[in-house]
Amino acid sequence: MPVTDNVAWDGRLESFKGRDTPYYVTTAAATAAQCTFCGRPLRPGQLLSLSVDITESTASDGTEYLAFSNYVSHRKCKEPELTVRRAAWRPTALTPLAARVILTQEASGPGSPETIVAALAYTLVPVLTCREAGGELTSVLVSVLLFHGFELAMSPGYSRILAQAPEVEESCAMTITGTGLVTITVGEETFYVEQLNSKNPDDAEWLDAASNGSVLIIAGDNLVITDTRIDLETAARFGTLVIGYAPVRF
């Protein structure tokens, strides 16, 4: 039973993740807040186990797709496990997680005003990767966003992100209707939809900030997004955090 840091895992995982296995294990543990089985918090230094469910499929062009779902637990609650199943290829049922925030960008010079920036943190679960014959595993979400003009962010700090983020290509945009329906499209795909209420103070404040014509999108794999926090640390550390300013269309 291999152990990385304090996390035990099934040795068969290495045949799927290769040299990325230790990073995958530590990333899974870093983004987990509580034990999957007992529900109690995970504390630094505790002995943990990683269980992984893998779904394999082959697209019509021969590309192999792997969908990974992982579960972190106290080792006393469950030993590490790995399950693999084969399924007919189809778009994986992914669950979007998102959170809206308002950031303040420092003035560019003396006498210049601060800039209020509407931002959206976005990720998909489970993480979806693909591998062409003989190639390395690649994050589908990160690859798609990079193709459309996003850039990798190496720092989770908002000030660095605000300064570094580029304007994405026109193929990516956010649309906000008069009724507060927010939609993000990348290429021809709809990535995100949310109905906001202009009578709700928080929604109204965010919509007002977005009215300046662009929204900062912070996306990728391994973002921790809950009702109470957004944690970008792990995504930045493992190179799966992408950023970009998307134009807003009304």
Image: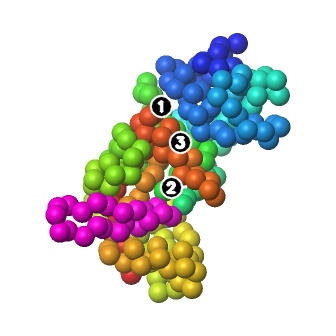
Q: Is residue 118 magenta?
A: yes
Q: In this view of the protein, which residue sits in the foreground, 222 or 159?
A: 159
The residue beneath circle 2 is: 122
Report if residue 178 is visible in the image: yes
For the point 42% across and 79% down, the residue is 208
Q: In this view of the protein, which residue sits in the foreground, 129 or 100?
A: 100
Categorize mark 1 by other alpha carbons within 10 Å: few (<14), some (14-19), many (20+).
some
SS of the residue under disc 2: strand
In the rendered structure, which disc, 2 or 1, sits on the residue that comes first in sequence? 2
The residue beneath circle 1 is: 137
SS of the residue under disc 1: loop
Q: Is residue 29 left or right of residue 202?
A: right
For the point 54% across and 52% down, the residue is 230
Q: Is residue 151 above or below residue 101?
A: above
- Type of amino acid under label 1: Leu
Q: CA distance from mark 2 to mark 3?
A: 10 Å
- Type of amino acid under label 2: Tyr
- Type of amino acid under label 3: Asn
